[in-house]
Amino acid sequence: MRRVRVLAVSGALSALVAFAAGALTPVAASAATTAASMRAASSATLYGKGPYRSDTSEAAKQVTALATTDPAGAAAAKVIAQYPVATWLGDWTQGATLTRTIDTAVTAADRAGTTAVFVTYAIPDRDCGGHSAGGFDEATYTAWVDQVVSRLAGHRAAVVVEPDSLAMLSNSACDASLGQQRFRILSREVAALTAAGVPAYLDAGNSNWVQPAVMASRLQSAGVQQARGFFTNVANYYPTAQEQAYAEKVSALTGGSHYVIDTSRNGQGWRGTWCNGPGAGLGTTPRVVSDGTALDALLWVKTPGASDGVCNGGPAAGKWWSAYAQQLVANARLGTPVAVAAPAPRAPSVAPVAKRDSLASTAKRRVTVRGWAFDRDDTTKPVTVRMTVDGKTVGSWPASVARPDVDRVHGVGKNHGYEVTVAAASGKRSVCLTALGIGAGGDRALGCTTVAVR
């Protein structure tokens, strides 16, 4: 029903970064503890700076592909390409292609501090023979999921697990034995993702498909307690408020499960059909939500501009349909622009923090000094320490020696120590040290000491 095969190119995931404490749950933690931590984390913790946007998304590719032959289509694709869209993984992404697709996305998302969103879409007997029929057999699917999980572990990511897989069990084409297989497969998948630190969301259809109590029962059977929660409205058009009202009921029936809503094409509401609905428009742009409900985020899960199948004039499922992309942009209701936080006020520059631990003549005509220094204007750079003897500079050196004790106390990294020996004439000498500031906060004098040089 949702096939996006051709569009699942480079794209968007990373295994989620931190739970409530801000760090990945150790693999050794019990499954119950890991799941509880996942479900307790805030949406802001899970999504960081928001969903990841790929520069090589399908819409971005179409901007170039259509530039000379279809300028209006290229312009519409350019609008869509401005926003994060989930990356779909299915039976068209296997082996090295699967690894490359995931690694490209999670690496870019990690750099940006955003969360790549992926969709798994290869469950056995997918779509029960509909427009998006296909999928793996169970053994192949299990191995495929293991590869997905292994690439996501340790990265910031989220996974929308198998759209339609649970809601479609209401379809007579999906028999009871298929339902039992799906519960087994999905339970294993979300447990594996959670153990890897990746928030997973199970299928809850949409507000006009399955009653909340029935949907909650299916979610329970599919292991929702081992997942972050569920998703609604994927590839559909129902208004966000209607979806949220439905999702809150399902959440209450599943122990407060969190959820995400697909707003990629719901800007104009229900269009009379799920398949290439006429008159549809882009909905509210992807964003993290913290409104006191169980809603984590509004996402563009379905790729805007991708056909649902050969219905209402569309090409094959997953093919880019320029005319439809133009319609979505023309009818868009993108919502209030996401607020861009004003840059934090720059802290005033300060002088280095430094200490001389010891200063002595350790050999004939030699002086050895040991200590540490760092500058909070930039703790990644070593502070330069300068020494003078009787008012004359005899040397300068970086404070870059490992000092774990300094890091433990100040939390600035361990490479801020110094220990050097310099030449000095025998006799009583006035030795002075200065830590040279990195920023505009000036230098830090460490004082002068009279040393009897041998």
Image (tube, rainbow, N blue to C red):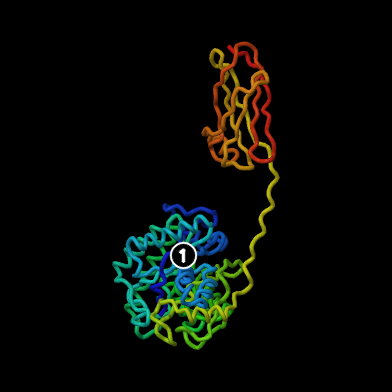
Q: Relative to residue 93, is residue 430 drawn left or right?
A: right
How many discs mark residues in the rendered view?
1
> Is 420 placed above or below 330 here?
above
Instruction: From the top left corner, tell me how far across and down residue 267 is, in percent.
Output: 57, 79
Instruction: From the top left corner, tell me how far across and down residue 140 is, in percent.
Output: 30, 67
Residue 418 can be seen, yes or no: yes
Instruction: From the top left corner, tell me how far across and down residue 335 is, in percent.
Output: 62, 74
> Is 251 placed above or below 427 here?
below
Which residue, given by chain and number where applicable, does mark 1 sit on? 56
Instruction: From the top left corner, tell me how far across and down residue 206 is, in percent.
Output: 49, 79
Image quadrant where one finds the C terminus: top right
Judge by depth and name the residue closer to the eye, 162 or 182.
Answer: 162
Q: Quadrant of residue 188?
A: bottom left
Q: Residue at x 69, y 52 (%)?
A: 345
Element type at mark 1: loop
Judge by depth and name the residue closer to the eye, 12 or 234.
Answer: 12
Image quadrant where one finds the N terminus: bottom left
Q: Residues within 10 Å of mark 1 (few under 14, many from 20)?
A: some
Amino acid, disc 1: Thr
Judge by depth and name the residue closer to the eye, 49 or 382.
Answer: 382
Judge by depth and name the residue closer to the eye, 141 or 271.
Answer: 271
